[in-house]
Image (cartoon, grey):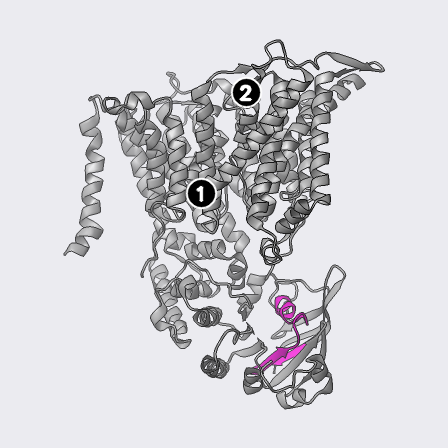
Amino acid sequence: MPKKFNRFVLPLFLAMVFLALPFFLEGTTWGFLVRILGVMGLYGILALGLNLVLGYVGLLDLGFMAFYAIGAYTTAVLSLRGWNFWFCLPASALMAMGVRTVLGAPVLRLRGDYLAVVTLGFGEITRITLNNWDSLTRGPQGISLLSAAVPPLRFFGYSLYTNTHFFYLIFAFLAMAWLVCRRLDRSRIGRAWIAIREDETAARSMGIHVARLKNVAFTISAGFAGVAGALFARWENFVTPESFTFWESALLVAMVVLGGMGSLPGVLLGVAMIVGLPEFLRADLFSRWGGGQMVNARYLIFGALLVGAALFRPEGVWPRSRRKD
Amino acid sequence: MKLLSATGITKRFGGLTALDSVDLSLNAGEIVSVIGPNGAGKTTLFNVLTGFYSVDAGAITFSGERIDDLPVHRITKRGIARTFQNIRLFGSMTALENVMVGRHCRTRSELAAALFRTPAFYREEREIAHSSLEHLKSVGLGDQAQTPARHLSYGDQRRLEIARALATEPRLLLLDEPNAGMNSQESGVLMETLLRIRREGVTLLLIEHAMRVVMGVSDRVVVLEDGRKIAEGTPAEVQINSQVIEAYLGVPAGSDA
Amino acid sequence: MFVSGNVIFEQVLNGLTLGGIYALIALGYTMVYGVLRMINFAHSELFMLGAVGGWGLLALWPGGATLGGICVIFFVAMVGSGLLALFLNRVAYAPLRGSPRLTPLLSAIGASLFLQNVVFLWRDSQLAFPPLFVSGHFHVGHLDVSFLQTFIILISIFLMVNLTLFIRKTRLGKAMRAVSQDAETAELMGIPVHRVVALTFFIGGALGGAAGVLNGLYYGSVKYNMGFAPGIKAFTSAVLGGIGSVPGAMLGGFLLGLLESLGAGFLPKPEWKDVFAFVVLIIVLLFRPAGLLGKNRAEKV
């Protein structure tokens, strides 16, 4: 049946091809693609998390990277103290969620753009704090986990350290993140979030406890960022505050908006485009097709493409569809 | 039996007194209309009763309990629902989803249930979808279930707001100009709908300008002017009240204002 | 800790200088927000382009700019940034009226990247801004006052006074206020809203361009990515003062400048100054959710 084929067999087939990619790429000149895909996977987890707040509830968050940073540093600091990664991971998620809940309680009362600037401010506060709390974070030098004292990341007896290992690890978590989002989307909670985005006043009159539901979204989204941060810390084995700038937060917002707010496939498409395009325009990739000339102008082209995308697909490149169930 | 009693309700905005010690009481099963010129404070009264505005003085009791210090969502949960004068639907959601949101306060699945898809979750989702569709059908929108709310016609949007409000299982339903923008045939259907809702045990409070609807369905009419209640009584009594006629200056009572 | 009056005075002066620059940029954010309810996130690039443009023009005066030269530079930078703001509105924002609220943010980020990289391709390094004729210090009692700082503060105040007069006294200024109160009604009253919006972009861009030149003079260098940090600060100033409010942006700018320089002077590590500024912002918003001078609009139900 073609319908069943489209809904089930085709995606499964594509997923299998995708998961087999590292086997074909590793060791070839295209091996760096595994790394780029891994980066996309991390941003995918982050963007799905941000989408809960931005896409569903409609709150502009310009400091989301702060929670990625908190997750990454939690894992880095605990790893230095000999913690096993599988304990660091939940610790990172809980730390990010805890900070976010405490922050959310007072600031979620703020309306629209005021909330945006507070999140921006919190993002900056986090980055500057990481940069200057030398005793814990080693300041701008960052924390390196490439020492003998840090136990390697193990998974059922296997050590995980290559890009391919992390590719699978990251995509496993991305799949989980996707599942969580999808289940929330099709639930009473998800409907309430979208109702808040569409009309907060009407949502309140439907008996929705708006403040509480906003905080729930705010908190869960930080969990996504915390997990992504933990993965990032052990993949790079190195964290510095410079990875968590406002610019990164803004790009993350751009990914969600570009893809289509509230649309899960759209969000991942937005990630692939914004993480992928600059790489695509780089010298070492597709150089034989003139990539070399583009290396300096790649962000210029990228910028123009973003403007174009906004103008031609104002609802996003893959907008949320009206589902039928 | 008294369902709602509001006494001495006063609401000020800066120097303006929008409601000046208004008393209102509703018996269970009644249909009461609030009429009055623009700016008389009718919508403000609704906003106070549903908790959107806090009162500056006075008390509101709903089935024996004070509700004037409760937040909006708690008041809905107690059983007061409303529609809005300037339709406020969830535009990108389908008609059915709009009504399903209305079920929020009568259902309980939390995060864990949604994430782990417990049997209780499925049961509740089925119940939500089923009863929402019933509400949609009851206002004649059964075949529009999958249409995004913003693509519905104006009249359908008003009906959808009523269905969504009914989904919260109110005992008291406040309708803010439900007849606005409807032609006379649609008005007739609306009046039938209102009477049917009442038969199902819901008390109704309307703000309405269309006298045909007000006179046709109301048990009692309350007249507001400049934030004060100037008259109250059966439609027939209000129609001949000289103060009311004066308030509507020149507009003969009984015709569509 | 012993703190001499001199040190405090110096920090206040630094703060006012910085604050003047922030305020000028913040005005661009706040005015556009006032008429369109939209944050122009590419605004900081207009500031950068004013600064880099000013640097380019300075080459015309190899021996150091004269007073006349400075006037020309300001004029060109302001008109240039203003026109660019018009262009930005035309290309990246105007076609998006009526689309989802955050889509302009996407085109703003794109435009921002584009503009930065246009300059990057032209000059990718730190560009030295030659010192002004107004270098050195003068003395008030036993206090040292820098000519340059005084110049910057006076210019920024001069521009703000003129802006205020324009908004309060002229027909166009009144039209602008009307649009920011209620664009729909203004349109019905026959105010050409589109032209008022364009004018707002122009003025905001021009003030940003002027701030860019001032910033170049103050720090002695400009670079393609210089817009970013002051842009965030100015945006924060606008929100601190109450976004949409013109006097709010001025107050917010000076306040943030003062907070930052006093923070840098008296906190254990000067790097904490930005933390200090943002913490104050958050606290202010918790108590005054619409900023210091912003009006808290009652919820319309």
Is A304 displayed left or right of C2 in the figure?
left
Instruction: Read off the residue under disc 1.
Output: A221
Task: Classify 10 Å Cα crowding around label 2: few (below 14), some (14-19), many (20 and above).
Answer: few
Disc 2 sits on a residue from what chain? A
What is the total number of numbered labels drawn onto the structure image? 2
Q: Which mark is residue A135?
A: 2
| Nearer the observer, A325 or C46 | C46
Looking at the image, which residue is at 57% across and 80% down? B210
| Nearer the observer, A157 or B141 | B141
Looking at the image, which residue is at 55% across and 87% down? B216
Specify the segment rendered in magenta: B24-49
The image position of residue A212, as x and y in percent, is: 53, 52
What element does badge 1 sit on?
A: helix
Disc 1 sits on a residue from what chain? A
Task: Name the amino acid, label 1.
Answer: Ser
Is C44 within the magenta? no
The image position of residue A316, as x and y in percent, is: 38, 46
Outermost residue, right side: C141
Q: CA distance from mark 2 to mark 1?
A: 29 Å
Kindly indicate the quadrant of the structure image that contains residue A266. top left
Kindly indicate the quadrant of the structure image that contains residue B86. bottom right
Establish whether labels 2 and 1 are both on one chain.
yes
What element does badge 2 sit on?
A: helix
Asked if B8 appears above or below C74 in the picture, the reply is: below
The image position of residue C101, as x and y in percent, is: 48, 48
Looking at the image, which residue is at 56% across and 19% down? C57
| Quarter the C terminus of chain A occupies | bottom left
Is B36 within the magenta? yes
Nearer-N-terminus badge (2/1): 2
Outermost residue, left side: A1
| Residue A281 visible somewhere in the drawing | yes
| Residue A46 visible somewhere in the drawing | no
